[in-house]
Amino acid sequence: MSSILNIQQIMKLIPHRYPFLLIDKIISIESGIKAVALKNVTVNENFFVGHFPIKPVMPGVLIIEVMAQAAAVFLIYDTKAEINNKLIYFTSIENAKFRKPVEPGDTMIIEVSKIQSRNSMWKIKGEVRVNDTLVTEAIVSAVLVDVEDK
């Protein structure tokens, strides 16, 4: 699967870094509509050490974080916002549903679609699929804010 944004390009758009940069690439963006990201889940992820050693499962909160990072890239890319001194804060998560576990070896396809935006506020629907099966869905809200230098 080819990408329109590789990891180096993603790192120019969002401030997340190892071990918290969770998306691997953006495979499509439809301006103003949606973006699709990819995350390869490996047994080497540090959270699998304790969640759970007997049966590794990706924590649901990190699946939501993957969705949030894809949404952040979409927001910055789509608005062409200058990211110097800006951050995206997520303000709410609604209707989160975890339908199936995500395990080592899975490839997550994350689709984030704009529901609405007003000024610097966005509401986005996120869906995560593994092997074309919906595993997680949620609605997230976010705001793009200026950050003062200290």
Image (cartoon, rainbow, N blue to C red):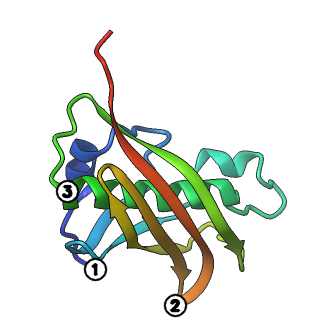
Q: Name the residue carrying label 1.
A: 1
- In percent of width and height, residue 38 lies at 39, 69
> Measuring 48% from the left and 72% from the top, which residue is drawn there?
125
Kindly report which numbered mark, 3 or 2, lies closer to the viewer in this rendering: 3
Identify residue type, mark 3.
Thr
Task: Give the mark nearer the N terminus: 2 vs 1.
Answer: 1
Q: Which residue bears the numbered disc 2?
A: 132
Q: What kind of residue is marked 1?
A: Met
Instruction: Tell me: residue 47, above or below residue 60.
Output: above
C-alpha distance separating marks 3 and 2: 29 Å
| Image quarter in which the C terminus is found | top left
Q: Is residue 134 above or below residue 125?
A: below
The tag earlier along the polypeptide, 1 or 3, is 1
Q: Residue at x 62, y 66 (%)?
A: 104
Dot 3 crowding, Cα within 10 Å, few <14, some 14–19, many 20+: few
Residue at 49% in and 57% down: 141
| Marks 1,3: beta carbons within 8 A | no
Residue farthest along the front direction in this orientation? 118
Give the mark, 3 or 2, whose residue is nearer the N terminus: 3
Q: Quadrant of residue 34?
A: bottom left
Q: Can residue 43 be seen at all in this image of the molecule?
A: no
Q: Residue furthest top?
A: 150
Can you give x and y, in whole percent of width and height, for residue 94 in the image? 64, 64
Percent coordinates x, y for residue 99 in the rendering: 72, 79
